[in-house]
Image (tube, rainbow, N blue to C red):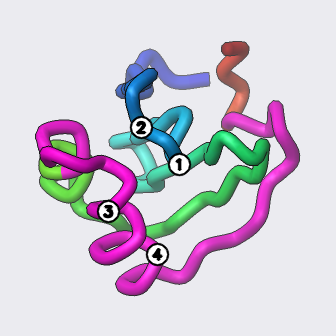
């Protein structure tokens, strides 16, 4: 595994999004919802992650600017690119 660090963000006050992780090594963004569902989005610019974590509503940002703009692939709960959360 590379020394590249995965950027992780968790916002407890979101009613929909439990966690957002970004891997700059492969430009992938992973979103876990409070429902337990997790998706990986490929070819996401790092600025999208930065906008997501600074958005007034991360759930609204994910719904509008990530889910609708990038192809998401469902993941297993702990399939986080070798990172143990």
Q: Write the residue at 43% across / 27% down.
A: 6
Q: Write the residue at 68% across / 36% down.
A: 81
* Secondary structure category for the residue under label 4: helix
Residue 63 magenta-highlighted: yes
* Secondary structure category for the residue under label 1: loop
Vertical arrangement, residue 37 with respect to residue 9, above or below? below
Nearer the observer, disc 3 or disc 4?
A: 3
Q: Is residue 53 left or right of residue 33?
A: left
- Using the image as rendered, state which of residue 39 and residue 10 is in the foreground: 10
Q: For the residues marked 2 and 1, what is the alpha-carbon distance in whole angstroms?
A: 5 Å
Q: Residues within 10 Å of mark 3 (few under 14, many from 20)?
A: some
The residue indicated by pointer 2 is: 14
The residue indicated by pointer 1 is: 16
| Picture quadrant of residue 7 | top left
Image coords of residue 40 (percent x, y): 60, 59
Image coords of residue 32 (percent x, y): 62, 44
Name the quadrant of the N terminus: top right
The residue indicated by pointer 3 is: 60
Q: Write the residue at 44% across / 16% down.
A: 3
Q: Which residues are magenta?
A: 52-80
Mark nearer the N terminus (3 vs 4): 3
The residue indicated by pointer 4 is: 67
Nearer the observer, disc 1 or disc 4?
A: 1
């Amino acid at each position: 595994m590379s020394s590249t660090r995965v950027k992780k963000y968790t916002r407890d006050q979101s009613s929909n999004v439990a966690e957002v992780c970004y891997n700059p090594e492969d430009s992938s963004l992973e979103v876990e919802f409070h429902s337990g569902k997790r998706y990986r989005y490929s070819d996401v610019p790092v600025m999208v992650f930065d906008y997501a974590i600074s958005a007034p509503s991360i759930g609204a940002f994910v719904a509008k600017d990530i889910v609708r703009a990038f192809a998401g692939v469902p993941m297993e709960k702990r399939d986080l690119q070798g990172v143990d959360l």
